[in-house]
Amino acid sequence: MTKAMSEKKIKEMEWAESLVAKIDADERPYIKYKESRPITDLKHMIETSTLLFGEHTAFMQKDSNDTPYRKITYRQMLEDVNGLGTALIAKGFKDKRIAVIGENCYQWASSYLAVACGTGVVVPLDKELNSSELKNLVIKAEVSCVICSGKLEQAFRDMKDSGDTQLELIISFNSSEEKDGICSWKQMIEEGKALVEEGDRSFLDAEIDNEAMGILLFTSGTTGASKGVMLSHKNIAADLMVSPTVLKVNDWDIFFSVLPLHHTYECTSGFLMPLYKGAAIAYCQGLKYITKNLQEAKPTMFLGVPLLFERLYNTIWKNIRKQGKENLLKKVIKVNNGTKKIGLNFGKIFFKQITDVFGGNMRLLICGGAAINPEILNGFRNFGILALQGYGLTECAPMGALNPDQAPNPSSIGVPFPGFEMKAIDVNEEGVGELCLRGDNVMMGYYQMPEETKQVIDEEGWFHTGDLGYIDYKGYAYITGRKKNVIITKNGKNVYPEELEYLLGNITFVEEAFVFGQDLSDEQDITIVASIKVDQEEVEEILGSDYTEEDVKNLVWKEVDKINEDSPFFRKIKKVILRKKDFEKNTSNKLIRFAEGNKKEE
């Protein structure tokens, strides 16, 4: 360790302590939890967490459908990370780009940490991409080694053999031993542990520069080609220190991990955050196993996206209606909400059958990734499970705002964190402007795209999110739509399609809706079009089993007319498309707005 590097680490610690001091000095009433410890980087984070929580469970993993969850402690995690990191350096991958790809599992998480905490730059990749797309990213990111699940071995072997990439080594999560030139993750760890035993400290003593690129993430944008987002350890460490100030994360919490780990929302909030706070992570085996795994893991916290929570919520109500108990449950909710005001909450008794669906211990649902109907958040709260909305972007590692657990506003994306700033610029006559964020979480820039970086990060360090919204007098922020998605009428009026999509989504039989502007030759102005996919089961309950397509159109227009009644002329929906197929989406399950297939009439 050189003197210069030691001085740098001292300065990094001073930075971390100054951020904690900003948390302590924040007097806003909803900054309730001032328990953050200073961390300089992810290596520092997992080492200090192991000192504090060594025998706590860090990970819970199912090795097969028939076996119970296997528990991995913080101490075992650190030993495995140190072993794998040491082995990677011994094989010549110090300071190289190493990709991690596969299903959510302990192998993924420990590999990510082994690369980031002393080996090189970690490049999380999306397992849903096809071979050609993956190859392009491997070339673009100059990846030398890939650590992957067994299902992807052949794709990367072909890439390596093609000679078109810089790939030198493939490591498989699932192999028990080296075979056909593909290394075993398990064997690599054992080899590294043996080297550590022999005195190899190349990884143990590796010092992280928390301002250098440590993570290279590719966005799965809905408006064009993906961009490489360069994140530093400082970006992530800042998020980890500030975000648990508005909601409580306990060392006994169990996070339920469903969303793909290569997305920064799940990676920071559902993986690194619990490790920072001494909590556990239980991996779901896949969407079709959610209910089963919830019963087995009995988690307390669940991060999801609107589509996931909406489906769970709607399924609960569908089952209640089938049992003929809808009106009874609504009365019980009303009574319990009344008694809660005088300190009597009977939710655990009244709603036990519902909360048992989530394993019986669920206390907090956090929704991010897109806007969610506030009624669904309130609905979960009625059942006794607090549901909050947050906001983030890959470029901010990803924390932008979060609702406080003691003062949630279901219509808002939340409040900015201590030490971070948010403002709205170019505010129009409606009070809506572009939201901008500034703080230590803002990315270093887009990889090999300096011009695109300048377009989103200004000279004062403000990141221009491209999201339109406003901030109220209490500091809560609201999103009205994306800047790129705004439909501008010929007389200069702004129509935010997301607002209309939200209203359409509140209709019980609407499964999904997409609103866009169409310039029709026979119209004087832009025509607002709503493409709607209906829930066939809900429609059948309303119209009966022998309904016609004309009946469905009339049913839809009846509800659209209600929305139009409360809208100014320029914002009225003039055309409806009934869609039978699913909308084209990216791997984050977000609708691709520029896709012409989403605008076609079927």
Image (tube, grey):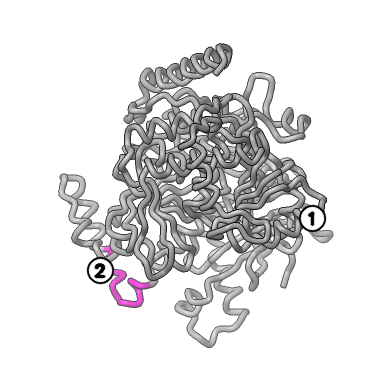
Q: Which residue is mark 2?
A: 328
Is 540 or 104 nearer to us in this picture?
Answer: 104
Residue 201 screen position, x and y as percent: 51, 30
Vertical placement of residue 368 versus 116, above or below: below
Residue 325 painted magenta: yes
Image position of 4 (left or right of 353) = right
Give the Cα distance between marks 1 and 2.
Answer: 49 Å
Please report whichever mark, 1 or 2, sits nearer to the chain's N-terminal start.
Answer: 2
User: Is label 1 in a helix, a strand or a loop?
Assistant: loop
Specify whether residue 542 is in view. Answer: yes
Foreground residue, 35 or 378?
35
Q: Which amino acid, mark 1?
A: Asp
Q: Is residue 528 above or below residue 317?
A: above
Q: Three-letter amino acid code at disc 2?
A: Leu
Name the residue rendered at 38%, 54% in the picture.
60
Left or right of residue 537: residue 253: left
Q: Which residues are magenta?
A: 319-330
Q: Estimate the x, y position of residue 528 in percent, counting from the top left.
A: 69, 56
Residue 585 rendering spot, x and y as whole percentages: 65, 59
Q: Main secondary structure of the magenta part?
A: helix
Q: Residues within 10 Å of mark 1 (few under 14, many from 20)?
A: few
The residue depicted at 47 percent of the width and 23 percent of the height is 419
Q: Quick check: can you spot residue 588? A: no
Name the residue that disc number 1 marks. 519
Tag 2: Cα neighbours inside 10 Å, few (<14), some, or many (≥20)?
few
Q: Nearer the viewer, residue 11 or 255?
A: 11
Q: Does the segment drawn in magenta span residue 314?
A: no
Q: Can you tell which mark lies on residue 414?
A: none
> Residue at position x 28%, y 63% from top?
356
Q: How many marks?
A: 2
Q: Name, please, the residue furthest toward the bottom.
A: 546
